[in-house]
Amino acid sequence: MIFNDDFSMTINGQAVRSTSTMPVVNPATEDVIAEVPDAVREQLDSAVAAAKGAFPAWSARPIAERQAMIAAVADRLLANRDDMARLFTAEQGRPIGGAEWEIDVCAQWCLAVSQFTLPVEVVEDSEVRRVEIHHRPIGVVGAITPWNAPLLMAIWKMAPALLAGNTVILKPSPYTPLSTLKLGEMLRDVFPAGVLNIVSGGNDLGQWMTDHPGIGKVSFTGSTATGKRVMESAARTLKRVTLELGGNDAAIVLPDVDPKAIAPQLFWGAFFNSAQVCVAIKRLYIHSDIYDAVAHELVEFAKTVSMGDGSRQGTDLGPVQNKMQYEKVRNLLDDAKAQGNRFLIGGDVPETPGYFIPISIVDNPPEDARVVTEEAFGPVLPLLKYDDIEDVIRRANNSDSGLGGSIWSNDLDQAHAIGERLETGTVWINEMFAFLPNAPFGGHKQSGVGVEHGMQGLLEFTNSQTITSRKLASAS
Ligand code: NAD
C-alpha cells in the first residue's frame, strides 16, 4: 500500500475516484500535499445503496464473526503504524509521537469493542408471560468526523456501529481525509463489500448524508453550530442522532495541591494536540492561595515545550490544523490584547509559514472576556482566580457547554463532592483524557446529545425491540 499518494474512496469494497478533487494542506508548511476525491451526490447514493445491500447479510452474521473482523482492524492499524503516523502528522500537524499514540489507542479500542456483545434483557418471566428486550441494528449509519483526531473519531463510531450489525458510511473532515481514506483502503479485504464505505468531500457531503433517506442514524462529532444543523436536517427523516460537540471545560485547582507537581499535567491537559481537543482544559480556575505559584510553574513548564513541524524529531506541539481555525484563534488573541488582558507567556503570533500559534497563557482575565466564554480550540488558556468553592462551581457551570471538567486536589472526597455538582458529561479527578471503552462519554447542555462508548454508547447504534410472549398455559 502506498501511503503518500493515490487517495481513493471505498465504496462497495472498491476504490472509487471522482471527477473533481480537493486539495489537502500540511498545516506546518501550508503546502498542498495531496488531492482527494470530492464526492458527487451520485457517489453518496451508490455508497448508501451498497451499505443497504450489505446490511441484511452483515446483521444476520453471528456476532462472533463481526467481533473477529473488528479485532482485525487493530492488526491492520498496527501493521501499518509507521506509515500511517507519518501521513497523520503531515495532514493533521500533530507530532509523530502523538500520531502513534492515536493509532495505538485506535487499535486498543477495536480490541475492546470486539469483546462487546448485545445483551438480551428479560424483564419479566412469570407464569403469565416472558418479556425480552432485544437490540436490533438500525441499518445504515452515517459517521461524520472532525479534524482534531481523525482516526480516533472514525474508530469510535465505526467499531461499535459495525459490531451492533449496522453498515457504515464514514465521512472525514475535508481538512484531514488522508488517514481515513487509507484506513478504508487497508480494510477493503477485511469487511465484506458495502459494509464499510469511506467517502470524502466538503461540508455539502455531510449535509447530503444528514438528508439522505437511506441513512438511519447519524453519529456526528464536530462543532456545536454544525451539530444543530445536523439535528435539524436529521429530523426530516427522523434519523437517530448522536452528537458529540464543543466544550469549554473548566479545571478547578484546590489550594492543597503541589503546584510544581501538577503543572505538567495541567499543561498537557490544556495544550495536548495544540489544545485542539474537545475536552481540553479551556478555563483553569486556581485558588488564590496558590494562583501565583501554579501560574509560575505552568509558565516555566511551557518554556520547556517545543513547537514546530511535527515530522521533526523532538517536536512537542504542532500547528493549528487549518487556516480557518488559525484565523479564529488569532482573532481571539487580538481581542484579548485589545481588552488589555495580560499574557504570562505568548500572545504574539509570528509571521512565519505554517499555522503556528505560540502557547499563550492569559493572566486572570474578566469572567466575561471572550477568551473565557468561547472555546478557543487552539493554544490559548485563561487562568482564573477564585477564593470560594461555591463561587467557582457557579462559574464553572455558567456555560452553555457541558462536556467535561476536572478537579485537582489531595482531598478526594471533597473533589468528588465538587465533581458531582458539575453540569458535565465527564468529570476527571486528578487526571485528564481518561477515555475508557466501557465508560459512556457525552455532553450535557449544548455539548451534545447521547453518548459514545460503553454499553450505553453501543446501544445508541440499535433500536430497542420488546418481545412479549404469553405463556401457553395461560393464553386462553
Ligand atoms: P465542524 O462542525 O466544522 O465539522 C465537523 C464535520 O462536520 C466535518 O466532517 C464537516 O465536513 C462536517 N460538516 C460541516 N457542515 C456540515 C453539515 N451542515 N452537515 C453535516 N456535516 C457537516 O467541526 P470541526 O471544526 O471539524 O471540529 C472542531 C469542533 O469539534 C470543536 O468544537 C470541538 O470541540 C468539537 N469536537 C467535539 C468532540 C466531542 O467528542 N464532543 C470531539 C472532537 C471535536
Image: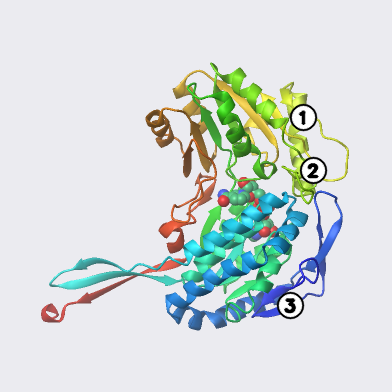
Q: Residues within 10 Å of mark 1 (few under 14, many from 20)?
A: many
Query: Where is residue 18 shown, x and y percent of the image?
Result: 78, 74
Residue wearing tag 2:
308
The coloring applied to the image is: rainbow
Q: Quadrant of the C terminus?
A: bottom left
Q: CA distance from mark 3 to mark 2?
A: 35 Å
In the structure shown, which secondary structural element does the residue marked by tag 1 occupy? Answer: loop
Query: Where is residue 328 shown, x and y percent of the image?
Result: 75, 41
Label drawn at residue 347: 1
Q: Earlier in the sequence, mark 1 or mark 3?
A: 3
Q: CA distance from mark 1 to mark 2?
A: 17 Å
Label drawn at residue 16: 3
Q: Quadrant of residue 231?
A: bottom right
Q: Nearer the viewer, residue 105 or 251?
A: 105
Q: Can residue 134 be seen here?
A: yes
* Lateral position of residue 464 relative to residue 168, left or right: left
Q: Nearer the viewer, residue 88 or 368?
A: 88
Query: Where is residue 201 shown, x and y percent of the image?
Result: 73, 65
Q: Nearer the viewer, residue 353 or 374?
A: 353
Q: Quadrant of residue 207?
A: bottom right
In the structure shown, which secondary structural element does the residue marked by tag 2 occupy? Answer: loop
Residue at point 79% right, 43% down? 308
| Location of residue 35 with respect to 61 vertically, above or below | above
